[in-house]
Image (cartoon, rainbow, N blue to C red):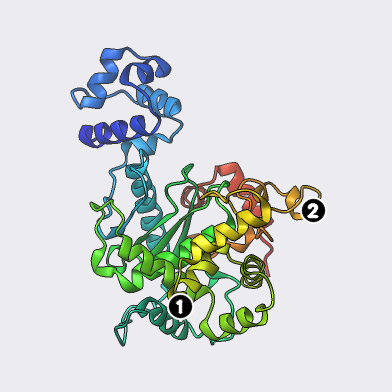
């Protein structure tokens, strides 16, 4: 056993759980002194003590013993310092390692279609131009909305990782091709709407296309200019210019708030995505206008995390748990943001007996019993 690896893992996992050395030692049923020596690397721990510590932390013993591959070429920003930042990078690194290992085992790699992508011109609207060019590379025409962003990304060689993190300050991150990517990680916490998941995926693609030179895991502060460009890219990518203009014009007789919400439903995006799309061509402050008119219409302010016109409780979709927390009108389901390539690769590897069900469960983050149920549900063609 590597005492240094154990020490680093224990410090990280304990911080994530907000536990002191003494409280963790007490929970694990070992002396405080013994635990401190284990975490400091001064003594080689007994397996039974590590098992007790792992149980108290709610992790596998492998999470304590395994060395962590540190990701470097990552763009990871959040509006506030995240206590779980280090653990998120560990989880993403492990997920990416498993994904690439599985692709190598099966000889089933997807070529990244934007690997040689270069923005052909510079202008004030370069994010929108880049979005149009990326859509073209993906084989999307100007009249084609995106109905399955995970499937689209995976078919173009971009790995998609849903990761639930209980935070309103972290929406996602992306990993450069040089680090085993490209990969897009999206916070799929239940209190964040599916519409926001989709926007985040497109936003991170914008960073991969526009800001690849800026990928460094040591940088934590958001750059407003880059964030704005990624927002513009995402809105243009999700709502192609000609189709957006057509739908926007067709709503020209409606009140501004109604127009935004109508177009939002057509493209299945958040109202904020529509506003991002309108921002470059609008002379005034379109965000201020929308919020003012919304308040005049409904008599209340729209908060930062709100989505207007949540569905009524007696509607069919409102009966599903994922629709309640985020308040998104005309809600999408979590099935509208579902990455499938990793599951397909795992199934193929299991059926070809290249990995065990235990390894498959580990890759997918399932218990062995859950993996067995999943295997039983597969229908052999």
| Quarter of the image that includes the N terminus | top left
- At horizontal 56% and vertical 62% (from top left) the residue drawn is 290
Measuring from the top left, give residue 242's x and y in whole percent. 55, 86
Measuring from the top left, give residue 340's x and y in whole percent. 55, 64
The residue carrying mark 2 is 315
Q: Secondary structure at mark 1?
A: helix
Q: Secondary structure at mark 2?
A: loop
* Residue 205 vs residue 70, the one in the foreground: 205
Q: For this view, does 164 lie left or right of residue 47?
A: right
* Residue 2 vs residue 157, the one in the foreground: 157
| Quarter of the image that includes the C terminus | bottom right
The residue carrying mark 1 is 281
- At horizontal 67% and vertical 57% (from top left) the residue drawn is 297
- At horizontal 74% and vertical 55% (from top left) the residue drawn is 317
Measuring from the top left, give residue 160's x and y in whole percent. 46, 62
Residue 178: which disc? none
- At horizontal 62% and vertical 57% (from top left) the residue drawn is 294
Crowdedness of circle 1 by 10 Å Cα count: few (<14), some, many (20+)?
few
* Residues tagged 2 and 1 counted as in contact (Cβ below 8 A): no
Residue 194 visible:
yes
Labels 2, 1: front one = 1
**Vertically, is 87 above or below 195?**
above
Give the residue furthest to the left.
42
Measuring from the top left, give residue 210's x and y in whole percent. 32, 73
Residue 342 visible:
no
Crowdedness of circle 2 by 10 Å Cα count: few (<14), some, many (20+)?
few
Number of labels in the image equals 2
Whichever of labels 2 and 1 marks the residue nearer the N terminus, that label is: 1
Residue at mark 2 to residue at mark 1: CA–CA distance: 37 Å
Q: For this view, does 381 lie left or right of residue 37?
A: right
């Amino acid at each position: 056993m590597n005492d240094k690896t154990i020490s680093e893992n224990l410090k990280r996992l304990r911080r994530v759980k907000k536990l002191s050395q003494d409280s963790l030692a007490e929970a694990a049923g070992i002396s405080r002194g013994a635990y401190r020596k284990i975490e400091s690397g001064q003594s080689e721990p007994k397996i039974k003590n590590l098992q007790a510590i792992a149980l108290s932390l709610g992790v596998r013993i492998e999470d304590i013993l395994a060395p962590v591959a540190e990701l470097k070429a990552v763009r990871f920003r959040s509006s506030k310092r995240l206590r779980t930042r280090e653990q998120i990078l560990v989880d993403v690194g492990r997920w990416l390692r498993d994904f690439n290992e599985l692709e190598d085992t099966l000889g089933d790699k997807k070529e990244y279609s934007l690997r040689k992508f270069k923005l052909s011109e510079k202008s004030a609207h370069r994010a929108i131009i880049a979005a149009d060019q990326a859509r073209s590379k993906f084989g999307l025409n100007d009249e084609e909305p995106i109905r399955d962003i995970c499937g689209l990304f995976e078919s173009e060689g971009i790995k998609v990782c849903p990761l639930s993190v209980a935070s309103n300050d972290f929406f996602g991150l992306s990993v450069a091709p040089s680090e085993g990517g490209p990969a897009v990680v999206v916070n799929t916490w239940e209190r964040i709407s599916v519409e926001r998941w989709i926007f985040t995926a497109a936003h991170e693609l914008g960073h991969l296309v526009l800001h690849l030179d800026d990928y460094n895991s040591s940088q934590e502060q958001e750059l407003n200019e880059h964030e704005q460009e990624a927002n513009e890219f995402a809105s243009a990518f999700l709502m192609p210019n000609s189709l957006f203009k057509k739908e926007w014009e067709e709503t020209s007789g409606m009140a501004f708030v109604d127009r935004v919400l109508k177009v939002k439903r057509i493209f299945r995006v958040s109202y904020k995505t529509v506003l991002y799309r309108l921002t470059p061509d609008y002379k005034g402050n379109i965000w201020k206008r929308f919020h003012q008119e919304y308040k005049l219409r409904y008599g209340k302010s729209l908060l930062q995390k709100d989505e207007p016109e949540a569905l009524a409780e007696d509607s069919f979709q409102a009966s599903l748990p994922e629709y309640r927390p985020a308040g998104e009108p005309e809600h999408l389901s979590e099935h509208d943001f579902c990455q499938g390539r990793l599951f397909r690769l795992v199934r193929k590897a299991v059926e070809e007996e290249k990995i065990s069900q235990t390894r498959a469960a580990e890759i997918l983050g399932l218990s062995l019993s859950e993996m067995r149920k999943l295997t039983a549900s597969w229908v052999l063609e």
